[in-house]
Image (tube, rainbow, N blue to C red):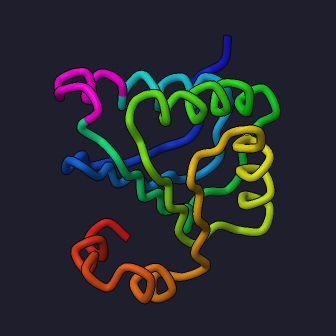
Amino acid sequence: MFDAHGDWQYSIEPPIIYIKVIGCFNREGVQAFTKSIFSDLTQLPANSIEYAIINLAEFELATADSLAVAKEYFHGVKARGYKRVDYLQPSLIAKNMLENIWSGNDMDIQFYSSIQEYLQQYPDHQYVKKWL
C-alpha cells in the first residue's frame, strides 16, 4: 500500500460544498479525500448538499487506479441529492478525464475555464471568490 498523495480543502455551507483539489492524486489519496468528506457530510441531514463547486486550478494529475475510486464517488453524488457539479479552471487533461468519469451518468456537470466565466453564469455567487 502506498502513502496517500494529493491534497484538498473544502467547506460545507449547505446547500453547497466548495472543494479545492491540489496536486497529484493516487488511489489512496482519493480514498482519503472521500473518507474525509463523508465523515463531515454524515453530520448533516440527508440531501443537505445540492451543489458542488470544485476548483481545479491547482489539480495536476490522477493515477489510473484512482479513477475507479473517483468514478464510484462521483456517480453516488446524484443519489445523495446533488443537482449540479461545477468545475472551475480545469486543464484540458482534467476536463477530459472528468468527462470520461461522468459518462453514463445524467448528472448536470458544468466546466468553467475561469472564475469570471462562472460568475457571469451565477452573478449572485460572488461569495464563492473566497474559496477560489
Quadrant in which the C terminus is drawn: bottom left
Number of marks drawn: 0
Q: Please indicate whether residue 88 sits to the left or right of residue 102 in the image.
A: left
Q: Please indicate whether residue 73 sits to the left or right of residue 104 in the image.
A: left
Q: Nearer the viewer, residue 18 or 22?
A: 18
**Going 67% across and 32% down the picture, which residue do you hit?**
71
**Going 34% across and 54% down the picture, which residue do you hit?**
18
Q: Is residue 100 above or below residue 86?
A: above
Expressed as whole percent of the image width and height from the top left, the position of residue 100 reads 80, 46
Quadrant in which the N terminus is drawn: top right
**Going 30% across and 42% down the picture, which residue do you hit?**
49
Expressed as whole percent of the image width and height from the top left, the position of residue 93 reads 80, 61
Q: Nearer the viewer, residue 23 or 128?
A: 128
Q: Please indicate whether residue 57 sits to the left or right of residue 37 in the image.
A: right
Give the extent of the magenta segment. Answer: 38-47
Q: Is residue 1 above or below residue 14?
A: above
Q: Nearer the viewer, residue 40 or 81?
A: 81
127 within the magenta span: no
46 within the magenta span: yes
Expressed as whole percent of the image width and height from the top left, the position of residue 120 reads 43, 89
Q: Is residue 66 above or below residue 51?
A: above
Q: Main secondary structure of the magenta part?
A: loop
Of all residues shown, which one is farthest toward the top?
Answer: 1
